[in-house]
């Protein structure tokens, strides 16, 4: 379907998605499935993209995605499509059942039973201010955004930027009780670029965020531009760091990538069951410094993953992962829960184009008492401050290695120069026990999680 | 949706439209994928994402819209939506875009081999093989805790019609095979992985090593890395395998010569005709699979309807060309290079690489090893990233020390970094055997793109991120 933004009705889209999901389940059962679960997403977006500071293109997109998981004799098959005609819907059931026909049986291949009383709770994700926005208003907002971003400093070269307005409805239905419906609307913005001063080309940086209420846009826009511009401009004049083994100050974004990523991955019940988790047999054990507390809060609507339901229609609720350094629990989706004979924690993850995965919705790391980032720099005294990580982390071993990006060399507790060609490495699981200090405030990282600044000891730094 | 030639229907929309520049791209993408781990099937999936992407140039501004229906009325509505979007934003466009100048555009049918063969092959056999290989990997050592095997094949059909003459219908298939094993000994856990990807049929995946050999290599790598140590960090002489050379060409050079990035001020800006590498380096990006068939980024026609030719980026150390779409080529006054690519029908084309490589030299691998007094051999690509200033990073899975021209015992892989043109300036040895080895990778730039990269073994100097105590 192709329409303009004005005639897209989100409430109608949600109702249509729910009807299609139920219809898909019925078709699959009629075709011979023992169990069926359908997910339908239906939405529209308008994106205004900028390149090299000028408007590149405005794109309007509208469509639906339908995913169907079937179980037949404990054998699983999955099919998805963006086609919505009757033939395509019938084809989905046929394709999924055909795959189930030759997949081996697995005793855990049963949908989680969801009682009708288990309705998800939480705020609406559609604020009246974003119920609808004509294209010209989206373009006007985008133009204001890019003008503000490019006006910060003549040396700033914003390679790519965008502002998009999106609305989407999701429905999950199954013959095991799932009947979840949820809609969301947001304005998202992104910035990517670098600073150039004569022959000096600084390293790039990027930032992005979103709002659910139009009244919040200017504040988030201001903060995003400030974060992006200060990092990119600060990358000019980069020099050498020094090689050492010791404390490094991690920005919220860098700490998320290097430490929280592998922690979450190892907390997946499937990773534990399959023998590729360093946190196996560590429930109730110390896995991090006592100042580290991490939890998932799907009711935090400031974060993009906020939701009332997980991918399988199970209500999503607050979940404690690590408290005071002690591992509190593993994340479960329906399949992993069935393997261990426990209830799902509501962490089915993913969209309509794949079998449900496993992951958190809106991750939080609790702030500490270390003051602000400046206080942590003074505690570091001399060493490396990393704002962005460009590297790799092995989720099984926890080994990480990468380049310190938008990084600064600290002396006397102050930033003395940006650095380039500086690699750092270590093991995330080991170093979670070497946290020296945590800032007193957390920050929202790219609209996805809330994480504070963290000073970590024992990191290997190699300077070029 | 249809599997017959979509270009006539698209052309009829353009005939009826008669407006400004319009580009219509029908893109049917159908994939089949399997994933097994520890004897269980995690993924058995068929997916389709099909529709028509429409790009119009109206009032000097691009507008884009899409439809999931290959029907004349639906495509016309998408043209109208794209035109409305362009008009709504034209006032905000500062430098008006001119219609792309005339150039050679593709007309006709352009199929890559393997489509019909893979489509006819039963997925059931692939699942049986995946289950067998995964079980064999787990059985190969008591230290293997977990193994997984994944297979996917993506069938793509495109019809590209533009108002200035392109009318091309293309089909291709891209299969991928991945094997991973996790080994544990005491508190130590290590991972081994092998993956291959191709454009073509099943045989294209396993020209160099069979599926069984790849599974065995992944398992052995995981076990062997348990007892391996970290190499010493610092600026080191290194010998990069073809897969790592692929990462170097793609991440360190390829991105910096994408013309959109050049226009924003990448480190390659203004360097055409200048020496940016040693004379041993000739670096190209090609829509064809040079040297032998099957490279993962192969395509005949790009998503603007331009034939996807071979582009020499660096010739014997001199920067010769950037990578272009039609708009950037017009800006630089050169011919487009066929690098405009879109991930799916509802994505607009961007400047992307295809198969990027360094041409082979004259030496053997043994001669290169013998020529290094103190250095490292690096193999097994992980991820990578490049920066505007040419600083790159990529990860490796395995390393071997070279002392006095002799290769030592396996060490753990490391991440390496450097400034692209500085590193290319240190290249002093290029092997004669060529290999594509990044076909299972995807490039990310707002939207994914299937690419490949490779080359011969190559000697240079980089910054190695080993452990320091």
Image (cartoon, coloured by chain):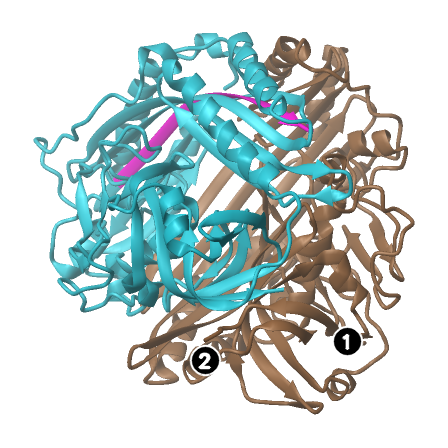
Chain colours: A cyan, B brown
Q: Which residue is mark 1?
A: B433
Rendered view: A121 above or below A206: above
In the rendered view, does B401 fall on the left or right side of B227?
right
- Name the element at disc 1: loop
The answer to whether residue B291 shows anywhere in this view is: yes
Q: How many marks?
A: 2
Stretch in magenta:
A37-52
Rendered view: B132 above or below A382: below
Q: CA gap, disc 2 to disc 1?
A: 27 Å
Quadrant of image for the C terminus of chain A: bottom right
Crowdedness of circle 2 by 10 Å Cα count: few (<14), some, many (20+)? many
Q: Which residue is mark 2?
A: B225
- Residue A376: image tag: none
Rendered view: B384 above or below A354: below
Q: Nearer the viewer, residue B23 or B418?
A: B418
Please check whether the numbered discs 2 and 1 fall on a single chain.
Answer: yes
- Mark 2 vs mark 1: give the one in front: 2
- Name the element at disc 2: helix
In the rendered view, does B366 fall on the left or right side of B438?
right
Crowdedness of circle 1 by 10 Å Cα count: few (<14), some, many (20+)? some
Q: Is residue A39 magenta?
A: yes
Residue at the image point whose x is 30% and y is 42% from the top: A371
Rendered view: B337 above or below B332: below
Q: Earlier in the sequence, mark 2 or mark 1?
A: 2
In the rendered view, does B215 fall on the left or right side of A315?
right
Q: Position of residue A85 (x, y in %)?
A: 44, 26
Q: Chain of mark 2?
A: B
The answer to whether residue A28 shows anywhere in this view is: no
């Amino acid at each position: 379907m192709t329409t303009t933004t004005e005639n897209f009705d989100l409430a109608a889209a949600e109702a249509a998605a729910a009807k299609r999901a139920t219809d898909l389940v019925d078709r699959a059962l009629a075709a011979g499935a023992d169990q069926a679960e359908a997910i339908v997403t239906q939405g529209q977006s308008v994106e205004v993209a900028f390149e090299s500071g000028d408007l590149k293109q405005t794109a309007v997109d509208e469509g639906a995605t339908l995913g169907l998981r079937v179980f037949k004799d404990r054998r699983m098959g999955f099919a998805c499509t963006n086609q919505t005609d009757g033939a395509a819907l019938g084809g989905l059931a046929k394709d999924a059942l055909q795959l189930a026909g030759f997949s081996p049986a697995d005793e855990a291949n049963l949908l989680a039973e969801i009682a009708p009383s288990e309705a998800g709770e939480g705020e609406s994700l559609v604020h009246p201010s974003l119920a609808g926005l004509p294209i010209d208003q989206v373009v006007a907002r985008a133009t204001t955004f890019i003008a503000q971003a490019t006006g910060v400093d003549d040396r700033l070269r914003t390679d790519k930027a965008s502002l998009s307005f999106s609305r989407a409805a999701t429905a999950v239905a199954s013959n095991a009780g799932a009947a979840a419906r949820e809609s969301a609307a947001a304005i998202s913005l992104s910035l990517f670029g670098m600073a150039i001063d004569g022959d000096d080309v600084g390293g790039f940086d990027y930032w992005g965020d979103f709002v659910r209420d139009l009244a919040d846009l200017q504040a988030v826009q201001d903060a995003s531009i400030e974060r992006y511009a200060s990092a990119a401009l600060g990358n000019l004049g980069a020099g050498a760091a020094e090689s050492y083994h010791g404390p490094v100050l991690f920005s919220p974004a860098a700490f998320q990538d290097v430490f929280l990523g592998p922690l979450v991955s190892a907390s997946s019940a499937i990773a534990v069951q399959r023998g590729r988790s360093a946190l196996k047999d560590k429930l109730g054990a110390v896995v991090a410094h006592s100042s580290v507390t991490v939890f998932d809060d799907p009711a935090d609507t400031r974060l993009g993953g906020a939701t009332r339901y997980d991918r399988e229609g199970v209500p999503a609720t607050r979940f404690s992962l690590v408290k005071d350094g002690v591992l509190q629990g593993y994340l479960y989706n329906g399949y992993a829960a069935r393997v261990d004979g426990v209830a799902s924690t509501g962490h089915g993850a993913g969209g309509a184009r794949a079998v449900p995965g496993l992951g958190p919705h809106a991750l939080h790391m609790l702030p500490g008492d270390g003051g602000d980032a400046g206080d942590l720099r003074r505690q570091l005294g001399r060493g490396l401050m990393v704002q962005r990580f460009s590297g790799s982390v092995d989720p099984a071993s926890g080994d990480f290695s990468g380049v310190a990006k938008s990084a600064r060399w600290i002396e006397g507790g102050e930033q003395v120069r940006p650095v380039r060609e500086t690699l750092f490495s270590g093991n995330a699981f080991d170093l979670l026990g070497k946290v020296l200090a945590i800032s007193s405030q957390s920050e929202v990282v790219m609209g996805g999680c809330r994480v504070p600044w963290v000073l970590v000891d024992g990191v290997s730094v190699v300077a070029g | 949706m249809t599997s017959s030639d979509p270009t006539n229907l698209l052309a009829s929309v353009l005939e009826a439209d008669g407006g400004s520049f319009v580009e219509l791209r029908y893109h049917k993408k159908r994939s089949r994928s399997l994933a097994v781990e520890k004897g269980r099937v995690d993924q058995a999936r068929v997916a389709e994402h099909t529709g028509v992407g429409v790009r119009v140039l109206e009032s000097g501004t691009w507008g884009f819209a899409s439809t999931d229906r290959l029907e004349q009325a639906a495509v016309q509505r998408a043209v109208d939506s794209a035109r409305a979007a362009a008009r709504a934003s034209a006032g905000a466009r500062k430098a008006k875009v001119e219609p792309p100048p005339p150039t050679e555009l593709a007309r006709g049918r352009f199929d890559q081999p393997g489509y019909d063969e893979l489509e006819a092959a039963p997925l059931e056999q692939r699942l049986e093989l995946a289950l067998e290989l995964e079980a064999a990997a787990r059985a190969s050592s008591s230290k293997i805790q977990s193994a997984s095997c994944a297979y996917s094949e993506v069938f793509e059909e495109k019809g590209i019609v533009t108002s200035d003459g392109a009318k091309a219908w293309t089909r291709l298939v891209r299969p991928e095979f991945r094997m991973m094993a996790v080994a544990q000994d005491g508190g130590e856990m290590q991972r081994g992985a092998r993956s291959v990807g191709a454009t073509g049929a099943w045989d294209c995946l396993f020209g160099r090593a069979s599926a069984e050999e790849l599974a065995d290599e992944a398992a052995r790598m995981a076990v062997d890395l348990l007892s391996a140590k970290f190499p010493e960090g610092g600026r080191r002489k290194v010998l990069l395998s073809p897969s790592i050379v692929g990462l170097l060409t793609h991440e360190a050079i390829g991105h910096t010569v994408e013309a959109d990035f050049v226009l924003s001020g990448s480190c390659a800006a203004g360097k055409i005709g200048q020496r940016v590498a040693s004379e041993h380096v000739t670096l190209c990006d090609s829509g064809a699979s040079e040297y032998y068939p099957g490279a993962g980024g192969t395509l005949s026609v790009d998503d603007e309807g331009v034939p996807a030719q071979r582009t020499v980026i660096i010739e014997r150390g001199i920067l010769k060309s950037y990578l272009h779409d039609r708009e950037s080529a017009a800006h630089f006054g050169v011919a487009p290079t066929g690098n405009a690519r879109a991930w799916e029908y509802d994505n607009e084309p961007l400047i992307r690489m295809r198969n990027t490589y360094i041409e082979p030299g004259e030496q053997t691998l043994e001669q290169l090893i013998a020529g290094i007094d103190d250095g490292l051999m690096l193999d097994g690509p992980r991820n990578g990233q490049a920066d505007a200033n040419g600083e790159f990073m990529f990860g490796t899975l395995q390393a071997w020390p070279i002392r006095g021209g002799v290769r030592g015992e396996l060490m753990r892989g490391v991440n390496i970094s450097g400034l692209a043109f500085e590193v290319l300036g240190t290249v002093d040895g290029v092997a004669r055997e060529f290999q594509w080895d990044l076909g299972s990778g995807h490039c990310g730039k707002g939207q994914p793109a299937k690419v490949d990269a490779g080359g011969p073994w190559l000697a240079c100097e980089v910054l190695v991120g080993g452990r320091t105590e």
